[in-house]
Image (spheres, rainbow, N blue to C red):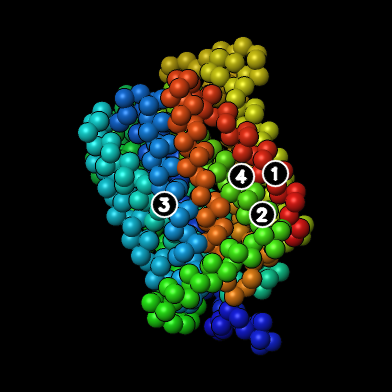
Amino acid sequence: MTTIAPDARMAGVARTYPPRAAVVSWIFFDWAAQPYFTLITTFVFAPYFATAIAPNPAAGQSLWGFAMAAAGLAIALLSPVLGAIADASGRRKPWIAGFGTVLVLASCTLWIGKPGDHAVIPLVLTAVALASVGAEFATLFNNAMMPTLVPPERIGRLSGTGWATGYIGGIVSLIIVLGLLAANPETGRTLLGVTPLFGLDPLTRQSDRAAGPLTALWFIIFVTPMFLFTPDYPAKRPLGEALREGLSELKQSIKSLPKQKSLAAFLLANMIYTDGLVSLFAFGGIYAAGTFGWHTIQIGTFGIMLAIAGALGAWLGGKLDDRLGPKRVIAGSLLVLLLSVAAILLVDKDSVLFVKTAPPQAGAALFSSTAERAYLVLGCLIGAAGGPLQAASRTLLIHLAPKDRIAQYFGLFALTGKVTSFIGPLLIGLVTALTASQKAGMAVLVVFFVAGLGLLLRVRD
């Protein structure tokens, strides 16, 4: 079976949906794209940049924050425009292919980031920002394909399954890096006790740098089924005509937002809590590296545990989404995130909730200290809440947005998720730079989750 025009339901025509293979292939986009977020921005390359390429961890966190802020601003400005053009032109796959190419090329560039080589910092940060733009825009157009894949009552499960699959992809990619590529500089052995594949040199941190090329290859392999088996929207009009019509419709949609109070409140809430969540994931690994002195193996193992929690949370959240509604899932996830972040700020290498504990010892087993274990538990809670929050958010948008302008509203969704996304990293970078304290920088995230939850309460699903 194939899908029909997205406005067919409005015209009273029966809707058909593609076969299971098309849906599964679409789901694997999340699997294909996830290593960028898992390996590069969170658990491998970002901590490596902060601790080995940058002059010191605080400076590395600050520089990384500025790069992510620049990428977020570019994504915010272009997302609604590109979404409106895509709605007017009809097709999604050409956009996914174009921005996927940006992701692939920029990720490969990260290989040049040698430890201690300060001269490559501008180029590395530029590549990271471009890869972020590619990943986010490709995801935007992939999200816009959702309404044609399954009936409305199964959208929540589809979204949750996609996020869960993405988390599992992140787990597998981390296992590959930790078990086969990343070696302890002292022992020369990986987590599985073998020498790194391909002769990767642990002294020059080639395994950390290989996260970029691995991300690129992974994306190429696993995004291919979506292009082969998932039907695209039908083409409507040439690009030039689509540009004019898309911009005109975008202008009308923005003018109508004040009359759509629930949709406007949701987009504003999404703007705030997504900024907090993205900042939390972006700096979680860097924060752990600076607080506990973790290296790639410790951070990567933590990432695997967090991703497992995220996969379970997203899968369960998808079921709760269809049963309870996405708004309740979002609210519950925000509460868990808020409490977990507040608790993490009270964990230091030698204390937990103001109670003194023994600090981590050199040469000890992984996560042997009380503080490290507390951080693991809180990190898993964050992972378990982050998956449902993101999956239910895109479901709630589909419930609230006009069906014939879904890509345009996903563009606005990305706009609100990115228009202030530079503020979170920027504030973390500025506060960290001013105070020379990673803890002070991370404390600003509490405000984002409180404000997002307050605005969400004004949304009627």
> Which is nearer the N-term, disc 2 or disc 4?
2
Residue at mark 3? 74
**Residue positioned 36% across, 55% down in the render:** 103
Mark 1 vs mark 3: give the one in front. 3
**Residue positioned 62% across, 22% down in the render:** 346
Q: What residue type is labelled 4?
A: Tyr
Element on which disc 4 rests: helix
Give the spatial CA distance, label 1 vs label 2: 10 Å
- Residue 54 percent location from the top left of the image: 32, 29
Element on which disc 2 rests: helix
**Above-or-below relation of 98 to 454:** below
Element on which disc 3 rests: helix
Residue at mark 1? 453
State left or right for residue 269 relative to residue 186. right
Q: In which quarter of the image is residue 341?
A: top right
Mark 4 vs mark 3: give the one in front. 3
- Residue 35 percent location from the top left of the image: 43, 50
Q: Residues within 10 Å of mark 3 (few under 14, many from 20)?
A: some
State left or right for residue 352 relative to residue 202. right
Foreground of the two, 169 or 383: 383
> Which is nearer the N-term, disc 4 or disc 3?
3
Q: Residues within 10 Å of mark 4 (few under 14, many from 20)?
A: many
Give the spatial CA distance, label 3 vs label 2: 22 Å
> Which is nearer the N-term, disc 1 or disc 3?
3
Residue at mark 4? 273
Q: Which quadrant holds the C terminus?
A: bottom right
Q: Residues within 10 Å of mark 2 (few under 14, many from 20)?
A: many
**Residue positioned 67% across, 60% down in the render:** 258
Q: Which quadrant holds the N terminus?
A: bottom right
Can residue 28 be spotted in the picture? no
Q: Would you say the residues marked 3 and 2 are in contact, meaning their CB atoms lie under 8 Å apart?
A: no
